[in-house]
Image (tube, rainbow, N blue to C red):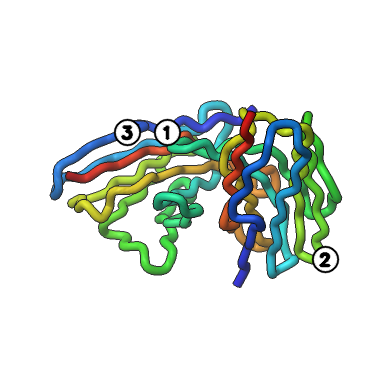
Amino acid sequence: GAVVSQHPSRVICKSGTSVKIECRSLDFQATTMFWYRQFPKQSLMLMATSNEGSKATYEQGVEKDKFLINHASLTLSTLTVTSAHPEDSSFYICSASASGYYGYTFGSGTRLTVV
Amino acid sequence: KQEVTQIPAALSVPEGENLVLNCSFTDSAIYNLQWFRQDPGKGLTSLLLIQSSQREQTSGRLNASLDKSSGRSTLYIAASQPGDSATYLCAVSRVGTDKLIFGTGTRLQVFP
């Protein structure tokens, strides 16, 4: 079955630094990748949609300069949280799809803690 | 705007019971509906995918049905086990977009 690998699983960083999270589709080409944020005991909130070779589309209210998304190839998308602050601490999850018709595969998530 | 609601929000049952989790959506123009399981602090595991033209899908003890016209889906779990304890999320993908819209989730606890 389709597998999406997300790294790191946990990261602690100091306030003001940047953190990069990687999302890779291991056995299929992902034309579209998605980045979600999840607060404790809440559902997933879509942050942005990225298509290979083009700029990401951000959801309303998501700061594109703070959350930089790069989808450089059909198997890799990265989310960089720039100048991180404690309020950016959250659980971030990526998902990938070769085609939405066939469903979506999710990564294992990254727990970001900004201290 | 598509809204997805799940009922109940939380459920606690003894082992062996058959369960029904409900998902409703407001816009019937969907490509498909997917049920996921999420364990605490983990990513999502896909359980079942139902295309808009299908009525149900089965995998082991799980059965999911879809009634697109009424905007409803149910996830049936037979003979529940403590290992089934997790949060269950339904999500729909809307025609014309690749976006998944998630429901609010049902937190399930199955005790021995």
Q: Quadrant of the C terminus of chain A?
A: top left
Residue type pointed to by label 3? Arg
Mark 1 and mark 3: Cα distance apart in space: 10 Å
Image coordinates of residue B107 in percent, x first then y, are 57, 46
Identify the residue shown where x is 80% and y is 61%. B68
Identify the residue shown where x is 43% and y is 53%. A54
Q: Which mark is residue B69?
A: 2
Residue type pointed to by label 2? Ser
Q: Secondary structure at mark 3?
A: strand
Image coordinates of residue B108 in percent, x first then y, are 61, 43
Q: Is residue B100 visible?
A: no
Query: From the viewer's perspective, is A19 left or right of B101?
Result: left
Mark 3 and mark 2: Cα distance apart in space: 42 Å
Mark 2 and mark 1: Cα distance apart in space: 36 Å
Q: Secondary structure at mark 2?
A: loop
Residues marked 3 and 2 touching at CB (< 8 Å): no
Residue tagged 1: A6
Callout 3 crowding tier (Cα within 10 Å): few <14, some 14–19, many ≥20: few
Residue tagged 3: A10
Write down the quadrant of residue A92 in the picture.
top left
Foreground residue among A112 and B53: A112
Residue type pointed to by label 1? Gln
Q: Secondary structure at mark 1?
A: strand
Identify the residue shown where x is 69% and y is 64%. B25
Question: Does A22 sit above or below residue B53?
Answer: above
Question: Does B29 sit above or below residue A106?
Answer: below
Callout 2 crowding tier (Cα within 10 Å): few <14, some 14–19, many ≥20: few
